[in-house]
Image (cartoon, helix red, strand yellow):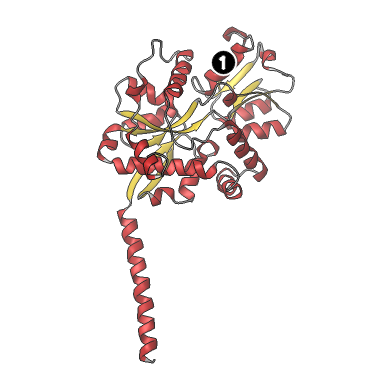
Amino acid sequence: MKPGTLKKVLTVLLTLVSLFLLSSSKSLAATRLASSTQILGTLSWPILVALENGYFSEAGLAVEFTELRRSSVTVQSVVANSTPIAIPAPDAAILAAKQGAKIAIVSVVIKNDASSLVALPKYRSVKDLKGAMIGTGGPGGSTTIAEAILKEEGLAKTDYTMLTVGSTRERYLGLKAGRIDAAILSPTAGFKAMDEGFLKLAGIGEYGKDVYQLVVGVNTDYAAANPNAVTGYVKAMIRANRWLVGNANREKAIDILVKRESMEREIGGRILDYLNKLGSLSQDGEISPEGMKQVMVLMEMAGLISSPFPDYRKFINLKYLEMAQKELGLRN
């Protein structure tokens, strides 16, 4: 081999070794983080995007998610520091913080619940649900909003029965079997049911404006000791939502969801359109006084708290959100 050729080969090999070592050092430097949410699916689409697009990795985090099915359990996991950063419903986080638990809400991920109240074809309107049995996932959240919708249509709580059925899939199957008359269904199950002839009577997220559904909750001790990890996590979720909004990344976004949910692409597209229509994907993670007030109004309606409401500032910490927004150029 000629000296010049050998030199070129050695240069290439050294470059490859350097890149490998750099990649390895970055991997070793990544902060390992256990996180959780209820279910990794449609309503946690931003999580799937952040994982797929490497937003957590770019923030120096190696995040592993656990599905804990219920927000109350997700919050318990945060408080116990098992998953020190998680994505629960805000009411569960507020209840725990109100009782002195070490948890704070640091940003908003999803607003305006995209679930729907879907019924057997014989029910043509919300008013027709008098005497009906309605399947829900349990008290609070979308169930409380559904009760508010029913009340607006002139139905008292004694006019119908709210039955805790379980997961949205169990509610969908109960509706198909005729065991319940109506159900609150996630977008995936809701669109599927509507395609099969069941009727959408109301959209949960169409009631009110900017009603928080999912937030980032952190263990306050962990956050104080790991501010960069919390900021990086919040930044990744904001980036994911901003990537999802609109149609610029539509096909890849649907690919990501379909791979997880094993649904038809057409339904994935309809879900994305509906999320955009509702403004569900928080593009800045902002926590507003009005938004927190709405959460507590719904909590009061569910019998979880009573007025006068506590100061919402006791339940939030804006420090990490503000740092994330600055790093993303969303705040001066």
Q: How many marks?
A: 1
Question: Does residue 162 appear anywhere in the picture?
Answer: no
User: What's under tag 1, amino acid-wise?
Assistant: Glu
Task: Tell me: residue 156, above or below residue 272.
Answer: above
Horizontal side of residue 320 vs 115, given as left or right: left
Which residue is located at x 49 percent, y 28 percent? 213
Q: Nearer the viewer, residue 69 or 205?
A: 205
Q: Residue at x 35, y 16 (%)?
A: 310
Locate the N terminus by quadrant: bottom left
- What quarter of the picture does the C terminus occupy? top left
Can I make out residue 161 in this image? yes
Q: Quadrant of residue 74?
A: top left
Relative vertical location of residue 289 with respect to residue 266 in this rendering, above or below: above
Indicate the secondary structure of the residue bearing disc 1.
helix
Count residues near mark 1 (Cα–Cα under 10 Å), then give few for <14, some for 14-19, many for 20+: some
Q: In the rendering, at what x and y percent does residue 46 appear?
A: 49, 41
Measured as percent of width and height from the top left, residue 3 is found at 35, 90
- Please state the horizontal and vertical placement of residue 25, each as a whole percent of the image: 31, 60
**Residue 73: horizontal and vertical position, in percent?**
40, 29
Determine the image quadrant of residue 219.
top left
Q: Which residue appears at 30% of the width and 54% of the height?
A: 29
- Judged left or right of residue 218, residue 290 is right
Q: Residue furthest bottom?
A: 2
Task: Report which quarter residue 18 is drawn in.
Answer: bottom left
* Residue at 57% over, 46% down: 253
| Residue picked out by circle 1 | 147
